[in-house]
Image (tube, rainbow, N blue to C red):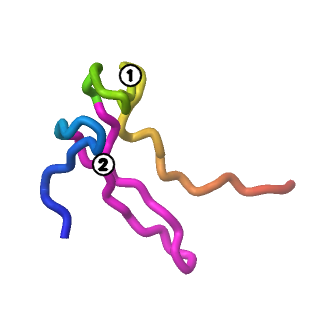
């Protein structure tokens, strides 16, 4: 089982937990993952413009008409 605190796999600094989702058998399922790294000295640094909730989780737009 995961620990309560997530860390960057590159530098080991704590990162926030982000909820993303994926579709399984027609149902959207939440998945908790590690957020972006905010340590400017890390190779995996996300930068200032990166936000943790980039995936807005909306359904795809309907096609046609």
Please report the residue visible at 34 percent of the width from the left and 53 percent of the height from the top. 19
Sequence order check, earlier mark of 1 and 2: 2
Classify mark 2: helix, strand or loop.
Answer: strand
Q: Which class describes the residues within 10 Å of circle 1: few (<14), some (14-19), or many (20+)?
A: few
Where does the image place residue 41, in percent across and percent down from the top left?
Answer: 27, 21
Disc 1 to disc 2, C-alpha distance: 16 Å
Quarter of the image for residue 60 reads bottom right
Q: Where is residue 30 in the image (x, y as percent from the top left)?
A: 38, 64
Residues rendered magenta in the picture: 15-37
Q: Quadrant of residue 63?
A: bottom right
Residue under label 2, please give it.
Answer: 34
**Looking at the image, how many numbered discs can be counted on the residues?**
2
Tell me what residue is drawn at x 42 percent, y 69 percent.
Answer: 29
Observer-nearest of 64 and 4:
4
Q: Which of 41 and 52 is in front in this view?
A: 41
> Magenta span has 26?
yes
Q: Please, which residue is most extreme toward the right here?
A: 65
User: Which residue bears the numbered disc 1?
Assistant: 47
User: Residue lying farthest bottom?
Assistant: 25
What's the residue at 36%, 62% (across, down)? Answer: 31
Q: Does the magenta stretch include residue 33?
A: yes
């Amino acid at each position: 089982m995961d620990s309560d605190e997530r860390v960057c796999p590159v530098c080991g600094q704590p990162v926030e937990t982000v909820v993303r989702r994926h579709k399984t058998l027609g149902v959207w399922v939440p998945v908790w993952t590690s957020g972006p790294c905010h340590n400017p000295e890390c190779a995996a640094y996300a930068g200032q413009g990166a936000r943790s909730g980039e995936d807005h989780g909306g359904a795809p737009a309907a096609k046609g008409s």
